[in-house]
Image (tube, rainbow, N blue to C red):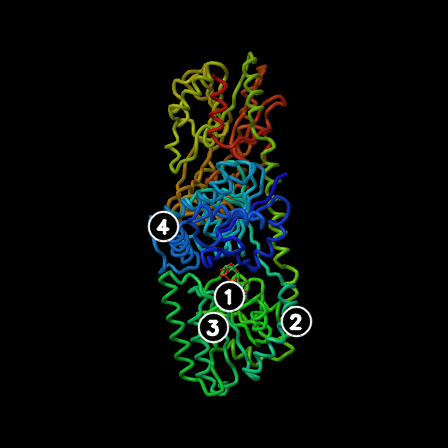
Amino acid sequence: MAKTIIVSNRLPISLRHRNGRFEFKPSAGGLATGLGSIYKSGENIWIGWPGNTVDDPEQRAEIILELHDLKMAPVFLSKEDVEQFYEGFSNETLWPAFHYFTQYMVYNAEHWEAYKRVNEKFCEAILKKADPDDTIWVHDYQLLLLPKMLREVLPNATIAFFQHIPFPSYEIIRMIPWRRELLEGVCGADLIGFHTYDDMRHFLSAVGRITGMSSESGYIQAENRIINVDSFPMGIDYDKFAKQAKSKKTQNIVKEFRKQVADQKLIITIDRLDYSKGIPQRLEAFNKLLKDHKELHGKVSMIMIVVPSRDKVQSYKELKEEIDLLVGRMNSDYSTLNWVPVHYFYRGFPFEELSAFYSMSDIALVTPLRDGMNLVCKEFVASKTDQTGVLILSEMAGASKELQDAVLVNPNDQQGVVDAIYEALTMKPAEQKARISSMQESLKKYDIFQWVKVFMDRIEHVKQKQAELTSKDVDTKVITEIQKSFKEAKKPVLFLDYDGTLTGFVANPQDAKPDAELKAIVKGLSQKAQVVIISGRDKDTLGTWFKGFHVDMIAEHGVWVKHKENKGDWELYADVDDSWKEDIRSVMEYYVLRTPGAFIEEKHHSLVWHYRKVESGLGDLRMRELFSHLKYMARGHNLQVLEGNMVLEIKRPDINKGRAATAMMKGNEYDFILAIGDDWTDEDTFKAMPKNAYSIRVGYAYTQANYNIKSFRQVRNLLGKLIQ
Ligand code: GDG
């Protein structure tokens, strides 16, 4: 039976060395709990780094055995791996980039090599456990290359990826020298998840601009499949926090703590030590509040828990020093014998105490400068079981998109934060209750278990969608059938579109001329069958490119026809009146002047506005504008405006490839017909084909054709087989 493999940089345990031995400390994090139902069942497993280096092979073997019983498998990293892959590329390049701290980004080629090397190590570890039809769910920014590495070895596996930190704008991603490899790496997955819609739209835009893969409604069209990108805001184990806050144990701790701080109002802040969390800025805002509101002295204090993290990275060391200095200054400025403004703890606390801190605090001040989601704010809300308390939340945290009933602040607006704290300190209990209870409702509903369920459901959904689109795939069986009936045929004909079908797309349309391989294929085919090149291209280009070939040609979507017997001349297939062109051309020219990179192609009976070379985004915008402008004019001239691959074309509606193909077939008794094309103009050809024809659409779009094929390369492969 297919199993599920969870993969993350860190396993949900920590390996510690103690007196030459080792021990495991389980992680109680939300993700570990949420995924527990998955990796602990059946043959499923969690693969990752245990969090410490182990060099002794005997100890490694022992660890493997012990973890096996816990349904985990370790990936061992060397000291060098940890320095270069984890502290280096992950935390000094990707982390600052993804949190918009470009000033901290390190561009180090050695770190990049280590990142690739360690992703490979993960891949090897997974391959030892994985079967071809397993589901593999990869977590987070340390493993961006892994989905593609896995896909190359396990083409049919179900691979999903979730990123826990933000995905920044294309403007940031483009700064990373290895951006393309990183994006292509993630795109090995079938489903790619982020916390928020903004993250996903940034990702889609970066993929479009950097890899050239287009997307629609959250589906990326990759060469051989669709990839779903979606937003999955992660929740917490709500009941666990609510229950713990009400428990005797926690309430006893609250009583103890309360004795020490009397009836002061308490502001809680909890973060890992990280510059993205905005800790110094928060202290500065609190300092300003105390400076402006002397009446609050002795009445309010801040409990600030900073959990040690990445303290070997230089920017983190500096941050720690900055926080130490600020707290020292504030406390020395304001403290009295019975009041300290900031209770500062640089360490973690056991869960019961953490819960007590949440439960006893009046305000949670969660003001990251950037945060993928932020779970602390959700945990505070869940712990306020008496429905008092105020959450002040940064707009820059993913959680702010859900928790609209928090007091939302811009963490860079110091006065705004000061005002928000003041508002929270003076907020009426009824309003506190209304806000907290509404947030609790939502957090209860979208908890971590729901998150895991929705994510797993979507994996299934995208696989089904892929299956629907590939159900008509030209597989080896179909190829053999086509080969056989071609061989047996006495009078075969092939209708072949050109761009996107026989060759790939290039920036300049005139550069797409047939290469040696294509020429050999067309020549070979034309000795065995009637070959019709059926294209939207102008007749002169087609005529030049296929000069001397024994083929028929249909140009400009059926305006012109050239029969191979008719050596020299093109025949005008339709009588056309071109007087409309002048009006339309002047409109198109106006859009060329406003859009650097755009140009007009004039065919005999149509005008085409190209925007492939226009800045991405702008091209689309202008095309839409021109489209509605032309649609309006087209009515008066009885013309048709059509959207193509990075082009907008205007022509007479009764001229199309289907009509031309039908005319070509008239009076002939073909016993083998094959039509291949890649866009909407070819749909007319497919529609015109008799029942017994083979029709194939390149790419996985919905189509009238009987089959789909991956790309022009596979088309060449198929045609090559017919001439073998
Ligand atoms: C990344 C993203 C995203 C903290 N102090 C103690 C303690 N904690 C626990 C909290 C909370 C967790 O640590 C921190 O989670 P966050 O979500 O706030 O932040 P990151 O660690 O940066 O996590 C973030 C998250 O991934 C999930 O996708 O939300 O945006 O940066 O659960 O409770 N736990 C205990 N003692 C402490 O002293 N027991």
- Cβ of disc 2 within 8 Å of ligand 1? no
Q: Nearer the viewer, residue 227 or 350?
A: 350
Nearer to us of marks 4 and 3 is 3
Q: Is mark 1 within 8 Å of ligand 1?
A: no
At mark 2, the secondary structure is helix
Q: Give the residue type at disc 1.
A: Glu
The local crowd at label 4, few if under 14, some if 14 to 19, many if 20 or more residues have their Cα within 10 Å, is many
Q: Which residue is mark 2?
A: 246
Q: CA distance from mark 1 to mark 3?
A: 26 Å
In this rendering, the label closer to the viewer, 1 or 2: 2
Residue type at mark 2 is Lys
Callout 3, which amino acid?
Phe
Q: Can you say whether 573 is above or below 348 in the image?
A: above
Q: Examine the rendering and report whether any part of residue 667 can be seen.
A: no
Residue topped by disc 1: 395
Task: Assess whether mark 2 and mark 1 are in contact (beta carbons under 8 angstroms).
Answer: no
Q: CA distance from mark 4 to mark 3?
A: 33 Å
